[in-house]
Amino acid sequence: MKKEETEPRSGVVNFEKRANPRFSISLPIEYWPIDKIKSHPGQTIDISEGGLLLHLSEPMEIGQVFRLTLFLTLGPDLDFILALVQVEVVWKDTQAGKEGGYRVGVKFVDISGEDMDKLKSFLRTLEFKIPSAKKFHLPNPQ
């Protein structure tokens, strides 16, 4: 009886290198280029202490820096908290989505200590107040 030999299998594993967990939640934002004063509406797709995945009405380029106001709220009957931040595009979808608009990943490049504290506090409440908010986190392989 001949012994069956199997070839070793190989593949690629793509580990996320995120230092912070992200939460899937839709929040309103207003954004505008650094050199403009007219803002545009948008929304978050997910959020973390390091940045955001956004749905915007216009395309952005990787490396582009813009400002946004993030409206942090936990429901229609609760007050919202404003956070003004400056972000840089680090990822973009190559095509517009089904519902129109564009998805871009941004990192925070300028956020005040006070606004970062607001954001951290808001993210901590997500785990307890909104069970449907999904937390994504893969440990950083070292």
Image (cartoon, rainbow, N blue to C red):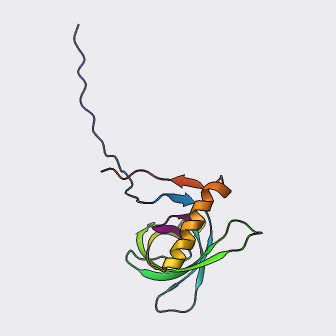
Residue 103 placement (x, y as % from top left):
51, 68
Q: Residue at x 37, y 57 (%)?
A: 17
The structure residue drawn at horizontal position 57% and vertical position 63%, both measured from the top left corner, is 123
Q: Nearer the viewer, residue 6 or 121?
A: 121
Question: From the viewer's perspective, is 109 left or right of 101?
Answer: left
Residue 51 in the image: x percent, y percent?
Answer: 47, 69
**Above or below — where is 18 with respect to 78?**
above
Specify whether 2 is left or right of 58: left
Q: Residue furthest top?
A: 1
Main SS of the magenta part reads strand
Image location (x, y in percent) of residue 132: 65, 53
Query: Can residue 101 be seen at all in this image of the molecule?
Result: no
Q: Is residue 53 visible?
A: yes
Q: Is residue 47 left or right of residue 9?
A: right
Which residue is depicted at the point 55% across and 59% down? 23
Classify residue 71 as left or right of residue 14.
right
Q: Which residue corresponds to the image point at 59% horizontal and 75% vertical from the top-left?
A: 42
Percent x, y for residue 107? 43, 71
Does residue 54 belong to the magenta stretch? yes
Residue extending furthest right?
77
Report the front residue among 111 and 15: 111
The quarter in which the N terminus is drawn is top left
* Residue 18 within the segment the image draws in magenta: no
Query: Would you place residue 82 above or below residue 135 in this image?
Result: below
Q: How many marks?
A: 0
User: Start and end of the magenta stretch?
Assistant: 45-56
